[in-house]
Amino acid sequence: MSSALRRSVVVAAACLLWVAAAAGAEEVPEQEDDPPRQIRMARATWDTGWFQAEIVRQLLQQLGYEVASLETMENAAFYEAVAEGEVHLWANGWFPLHDQYLEQPGMNESVARVGYEVRAGALEGYLVDKRTAERLGLQSLEDLRDPEVAEVFDRDGDGRADLVGCNRDWACAESIEEHLTELQLHSTVEQIQGDYSPMMAEVLERFRGGEPVLFYTWTPNWTVGELVPGRHVMWLEVPRLSHPEGGAETGDASVPDVPGCPSSPCLLGWPPNDIRIVAHRPLLEANPAIESLLSQIQISIRDIHRQNVRMFRGEDEETHFRKHALEWIDRHRHEVDPWLARAREVRETRPGTGAFALPFRDEEEDLGIQDGLRVATKRLEPFVTYHDRQYSGFSIELWRRIAEELRVEFELYAVNSRAKLLDDVERGAADIATAGIGITSDREEELDFSHPYFKSGLQILVRDPNPSLMASLLARVKSIVFSEQLLYVTGLFLLILLVSAHAVWLIERTHNPQFPRGYPRGVGEALWWAAVTVTTVGYGDKTPKRSLGKGFALLWMFTGYFVFAYFTASVASSFTVRELQGTIQGPDDLFGKEVVTVSRSPASEYLDRMGIRPRTVPAVESAIEILKAGEAEALVFDAPVLQHYASHEGRGAVHVVGPVFWEQHYGIALAADSPLRDPVNRALLRLMERGEYQRIQERWFGRSSGSAPD
């Protein structure tokens, strides 16, 4: 074979191999992306809509789905991303305002509107302060065509009314300009554009200063929470409605029963918008439970206004948004729980299928529990309370939320002592124990504990002084008068007086009629003389006559200065010592005092280590009664328990003193190597991450008494 022929064969073979490879490559099916593990959720750039977004996020998590951190997106960017499935949903769709995005080719096949968060509640329009509106009779935007009226709102001196409007890149800015054009207002009104939020803060300041204000706004927004229509400001009607892009009139701008509008229905200039959830359609089709929940969510415009005002007044951190959302969910449990129940029922009857089917936590937390858990507890307010045959309290409420996260049933029962509480878990009579159980090294040797869910320490409880000033003073005087030291000094002083009286009576009784010879009367008169002499009162009604008596009297007068000074100093010392001994301000003041605490508790362990031998009782209730009865001067125990008692049942009778000391952490007790430990810990961490733990903690303790561990 010639070389040319060989080259031709090689080239032909190479071409065949390339064609075969290309054909083979075409026959290999395109690999689909892995299905999502989390819901990817976006939120709008206007923070007045973040509250609704957080509510939706929290409800999806309570349904059992994982939701990634919210991504803030511009309108156009979101609608493009949700059409491609790059994000799954947001709660900030405004319709008909956002119809323009869904009118793009192919959008309706991949993007769906779900439910109605707020039906016809999103309004736009112009507002003017009520004082000026009533003074000038303003009802319509057209009234600003009058130069004299427009000049009232002129701040830059050009003779035109300054209308605080929208940012330049917002759709409303173009609409405002079109209104001014159609109503022939450009010669008397100019739209002031810039950063909307600080501009409106200035509007609020001017209003509070008594100046006229004219501005555009929308609802829901903090602006109508601070400047309430009908009370502070009035709507200005717009005779015609314009579309921001085409200039053609569209929709119905008349809205009935608008507070602060001159007429009803009110012509605002924009049609009312529905606020709706927008989602990736394939995601909803693959997860019917998600679609069920989203279609049910409704949030009142009034609640959104209230949250926006809280945000404007300083509650503007991400943690605040989570807190606001969780508080709303808690207040609306009578609505929220049925939403979740119906969605769970849909998930059971129509499980998700397809590439966009999402896992939920129930599948990951298979605990293998058939008959539910036995949960031991012990009354310990405010961690565990018992009223009307129902258990409540911080630890109980937290456990119930953990159980909901794990989707497990449980039976709750109470014991009388901490010893039995822990013993029941150790020997398997209970699966877990929850109350105010401190995590200690000794307990960790026999049991397992969850992650710490509360950080606090020990504190001291003492009796209150008598609330009556006179009774308190009498009680203090009584305690000092009958003190051992004062009784000793007083007795010694009286003995010296008596000896001196006998001495002067024996010397003077035969020669001085001022000291009678009879013993009772004579010694009595001599005692009087000794007392007035030693106290330097010296009435002079009795004086010794004999030289020996005068010498003794002189000696007694000099000695009396020291005797009486000693007596006075001893009384003052008794008062001071008693005052110091009766003051307990911290753990260092417990030495030498009668202290009571609960046996086998961190408090008893601390006192033993400090060398203080307390009286111990099985329950804190018994210790409190001992303290109140005056059988102990101080009670040492867990700080939140004492704080709660002092501020509720014990108010006016006892109070806590000194700082919290000997820090300790509380946890849920489980048997050693319990398979429940990791699931309980994961559930607890999820509650902390979502802010639900903080809501429960603040409900029972406020912001000052203990906290979640760092």
Image: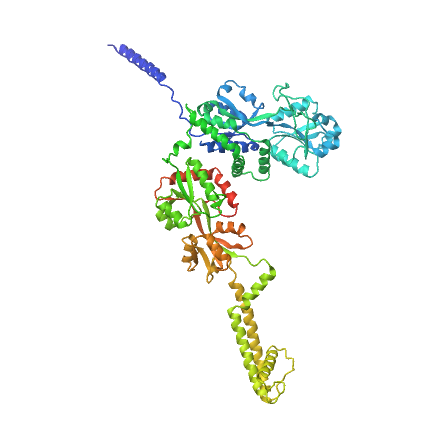
278 lies above or below 400: above
For the point 57% across and 75% down, which residue is it?
565
**371 or 542: which is nearer to us?**
371
Q: Quadrant of residue 306?
A: top right
Residue 398, horizontal then vertical, whole percent: 46, 41
Where residue 137 sits, quadrant-wise, is top right
Residue 696 shows in the view = yes
- Taking depth in this image into account, of 583 and 334 the one nearest to the observer is 334
Q: Kindly identify the residue that appears in the image at 58 percent across and 78 percent down.
A: 561
Of 397 and 631, nearer the camera is 631
Residue 599 image offset from top left, x and y in percent:
41, 54
Colour approach in the figure: rainbow
Q: Residue at x 56, y 59 (%)?
A: 465
Vertical relation: 389 (above or below) 237: below
Query: At which x and y percent is residue 134?
Result: 73, 32
Q: Residue furthest left?
A: 1
**Relative horizontal placement of residue 665, taking residue 72 as reference (left or right):** left
Q: Position of residue 472 (x, y in %)?
A: 58, 61
Closer to the camera, 141 or 567? 567
Q: How many marks?
A: 0
- For this view, does 234 lie left or right of residue 307? right
Q: Split into 4 quadrants, where in the image is the C terminus? A: top left
Image quadrant containing the N terminus: top left
Residue 357 appearing in the image: no
As drawn, 356 above or below 639:
above
